[in-house]
Structures are given as structure tokens and as C-alpha cells.
Amino acid sequence: MATSWAQLAERGRGPQAVDTWLRGAGQVMFQNNPLTGLLFLAGIYWGASLWVAVAATAGLVVATATARQLVRVDTVSLRSGLYGFNGLLVGAGVATFVHGEGFLAAAYVTLGAVVSVYAMSALSAVLAAWRTPALTSPFVLVCCWMLLAAYGLSRLSISGLGPAVLPHVAAPGTSAALLAPLFLLEAWLKGVGQVFLIGNAVTGVIFVVALAVSSWRAALFALLGSAVGMGTALAFGANRAAVGEGLYGFSAVLTAIAVGATFYPSSVRTTGVALVAAVFTAIVQAGLDVALQPLGIPTLTSPFVFVTWLFLLPHLQLAPVPHAPLTPVPHAPLAGPTVKGGT
């Protein structure tokens, strides 16, 4: 079945475009697999509002078209979906938090998707010197600016976010309630769903299945990352409501997959490093939540980006001794994007 689809995707422009879009959706969690991408989209449509789901899909399609027609990136990166996933996340993020009059919200989503491609190209070129991928940093950069701008634009409004306030000491939760099995199970699964800004346990299950279709290790590390992020937050007394919505799990999910199942070879040492990275991601999540409170914007996936860079930049040799030179699994272009032709 997979072979038949791959052959079809190479023969016609329509199937090839769909294949590229689906791979772009899959790349949000490092999977260059169209079936994974299709299941990710199914999970989005299940757990998100119709507007958010449509905006995420539009962001994916617009970003891919921008990369192909305006930026003209290299074919391998384009076909792997590497210029679509940040557009998808920008579409979901802007649609989740920003509302506008008439067509303005749609125009805002479209603008963000277009700019995400240029941000991806720019950041990939800069980070190529350190042989480090851009990850979701284009999404974080573009979406943060667009959310901040909405506070100053009268025809746009921010919703779903708490008011901008000065940092304050977190109130402790109730221990018995925090350890209720149903609470823990839902928070664990929501941590996976929140990668796409969706606090829905069923969506989290769909995403885990989608990962398992492509890589059982990625699915395992997604579950481990969510559990570690949630456990760390509970152990240190983080806000109960935030823990319950999976908000301490999603960045740890991405960090765990990146370090444990994507950029380093499989080994016991790699697993240990991935777990340490996931724990620290939850700490960074708490710190950035406090730092961004006065601005009234969410951290998005910035804890994942910062911590994963921290663990990738040293280019650790984690294979069993004697080990071969590290060859990271490609995610974002590790050499600056190639621009072809144009006038």
C-alpha cells in the first residue's frame, strides 16, 4: 500500500502535492510519513474547532506553496514536508488565540504561513554553521509576534489567554486530586495532543497511533516525554489546571522524540539523555510561563526548541563504544536552503 502510494505520488502533480502536504503534517513530530500526517490531520479535526482545523490545513498548504513558488527551496526538503509544518502550526496557533472581523482572521493566518517559510529559510541558513536544525523556531518566532501584534490592532482580538499580569508565586494543588488515575491519564494523553495546541485526550491517542505507524520508538518517546513532563510538574507543584490540560507535557514530548528517537542513534545512553532533556524541558516551561506572563502570550513550543538545541549543539557521541561518527537524522535543512532559478 505504501509503495503504491509512493509510486502514485511521483506520477501526478495532484497526488504529489497531497503527499507533500501530508509529510509536512507528519514533520511536526519528525515523521516523514504521509500516513502519519493524515492521522495527525484527523486528530486535529477531531479535537479542535472547525476554524482551527481549517486554519491549520490552510497554513500547511499556503506554506508549502510559498516554498515551492516564491522561495523555490530545494526539492528534497520541499517534498519531505520541511517547509510545511511550521505553517501548519502558525495556522493553528493564530486561529486558536486571535479572532478578527470578516476576512481579516483568514488573511492573518495566510500572512503567518507565508512568513513562516522565510523564517525557516533564514534560521536554517544561520543554524547550518552549527549543524543544528531550526525545529519549530520559525513557528515560535512568527506566532509570538503575531499574537503580540493583535493586542495593538483594534480589528483583531486575543482570546483563550489569561490577562497580562506580573509574575506571582504559584498556588499549591491538592495532592489527592493530582494523583487521581483519571486526571493523570487525561493529562498524559493531552500532553501529546497539545503539540498541536489541542487539549483532547482522544486526539492524543490518535497522535500516538500516528507516530507508531511511522516509528514505534517515536511513539514510545512521545508517551515517555509527556509522562516525564507531567511528573516533573507535579513533583515541583506546578499549577494543577495547567498540568491537567497537558501544558507541561507537549514540549517534553517533542524534546524526547528529538533526542531519543530522531537525531541520535538508539542506545541506553541516548534514552537516559532524552529523559534528562525532557525533565529540563518541563522546568524551562515553568520558567518561560513566568517570564511571558507580563506579555500575555503563551510559550508555544519554545521550551522544546531551547532545550533540544542545548542537547544537539554539542553533537554528543551517544552510540555504543566504539562508536561511528554522529549522523543526525535530517529534519530541518542542515545546509542553507538552495534557491533555484528565478528572476
Image (tube, grey):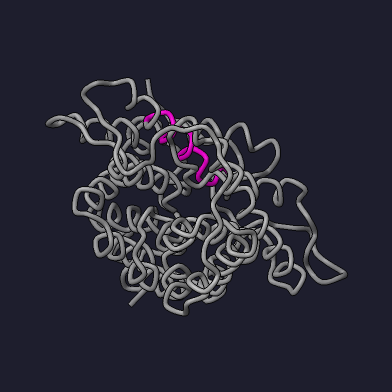
Q: Residue at point 63% right, 62% down? A: 232
Q: Is residue 261 left or right of residue 182?
A: right
Q: Residue at point 28% right, 42% down? A: 95
- The quarter of the displayed image where residue 87 is located: top left
Q: Main secondary structure of the magenta part?
A: helix
From where the camera sits, is residue 123 visible?
A: yes
| Residue range of the region highlighted in magenta in the rendering | 134-146
146 vs 63: above or below: above
Q: Nearer the viewer, residue 142 or 226?
A: 226
- The quarter of the displayed image where residue 38 is located: bottom left
Q: In the rendered view of the protein, which quadrant contains the C terminus?
A: top left
Q: In the rendered view of the protein, which quadrant contains the N terminus?
A: bottom left
Q: Residue at point 28% right, 62% down? A: 47
Q: Position of residue 161 (x, y in %)?
A: 36, 41
234 vs 242: above or below: below
Q: Position of residue 333 (x, y in %)?
A: 55, 44
